[in-house]
């Protein structure tokens, strides 16, 4: 017999919702008028990696919006029931086809204005083989001097590359975008 509990995570609003401050809270949320279910819309976690093969860095050209045609490190949203490093490895495979060993945690980058938290690792490629998935039109290896800085998709890509370049081993700092 497979029983399912009625936890808050399993429930959903059944009727119309309104934006209001629930009792005991300090900010507006979407609340079901009929049952009182509160929908918490929390920040999204993005995970990825700065991947290297010898002295080159892996970048993927985006085939999807936003910023289609621009270069990025392989990264994307963390899935439910997935650890952050597992998510980083999955995103590398999905976007570039590269097989990697996830290494040290590079850093956490916060962008509160868009409710995103980036958790980026270092990763060593096992081979230079690439096979981009549907989210990337191409994947390529670049030396530091070849990185198309003006064509990077997001500031977070630049930040991650700069922190990676600074070296000094694993970092546990929080990098916050103003």
Image (cartoon, helix red, strand yellow):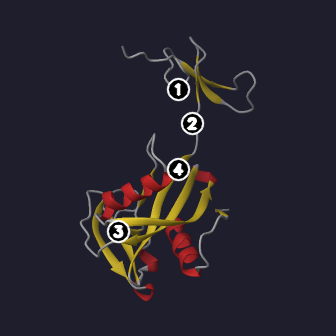
- The quarter in which the N terminus is drawn is top left
Give the residue pinned by disc 1: 9
Residue 41, image x, y percentages: 57, 36
User: Residue 131 appears in which quarter of the rendering?
Assistant: bottom left
Residue 68 versus residue 25: which sits nearer the camera? 25
Mark 1 crowd level (few <14, some 14–19, many ≥20, 10 Å Cα): few
Residue 109 versus residue 170: which sits nearer the camera? 170
Q: CA distance from mark 2 to mark 4?
A: 12 Å
Q: CA distance from mark 1 to mark 4?
A: 18 Å
Q: Are marks 2 and 1 in contact (CB under 8 Å)?
A: no
Q: CA distance from mark 1 to mark 3?
A: 35 Å
Residue drawn 51% across the image and 16% down it = 6
- Between discs 2 and 1, the one toward the N terminus: 1
Give the residue pinned by disc 4: 45
- The quarter in which the C terminus is drawn is bottom right
Q: CA distance from mark 2 to mark 1?
A: 12 Å
Q: Element type at marker 1?
A: loop
Give the residue pinned by disc 3: 60
- Between discs 3 and 4, the one toward the N terminus: 4
Q: Is residue 155 visible?
A: yes
| Label ID, residue 41 | 2
Q: Are marks 2 and 4 in contact (CB under 8 Å)?
A: no
Mark 2 or mark 4: which is in front? 4
Q: Element type at marker 4?
A: strand
Residue drawn 67% across the image and 31% down it = 28
Residue drawn 31% across the image and 57% down it = 94
Mark 2 or mark 1: which is in front? 1
- Between discs 3 and 2, the one toward the N terminus: 2
| Label ID, residue 77 | none
Mark 2 crowd level (few <14, some 14–19, many ≥20, 10 Å Cα): few
Residue 38, image x, y percentages: 60, 24
Mark 3 crowd level (few <14, some 14–19, many ≥20, 10 Å Cα): many
């Amino acid at each position: 017999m497979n029983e399912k509990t009625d936890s808050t995570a399993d429930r959903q609003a059944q009727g119309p919702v309104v934006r209001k401050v629930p009792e005991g809270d300090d900010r507006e949320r979407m609340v079901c008028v009929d049952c009182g279910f509160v929908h918490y819309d929390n920040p999204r976690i993005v995970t990825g990696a700065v991947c290297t093969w010898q002295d080159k860095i892996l970048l993927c050209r985006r085939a999807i919006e936003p910023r289609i045609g621009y270069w990025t490190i392989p990264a994307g949203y963390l899935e439910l029931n997935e650890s952050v490093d597992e998510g980083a490895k999955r995103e590398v495979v999905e976007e570039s086809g590269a097989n990697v060993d996830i290494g040290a945690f590079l850093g956490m980058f916060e962008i509160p204005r868009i409710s995103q938290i980036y958790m980026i690792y270092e990763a060593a490629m096992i081979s230079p083989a690439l096979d981009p998935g549907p989210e990337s039109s191409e994947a390529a290896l670049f030396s530091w001097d070849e990185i198309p800085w003006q064509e990077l998709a997001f500031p977070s890509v630049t930040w991650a590359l700069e922190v990676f370049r600074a070296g000094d081993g694993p970092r546990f700092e929080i990098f916050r975008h103003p």
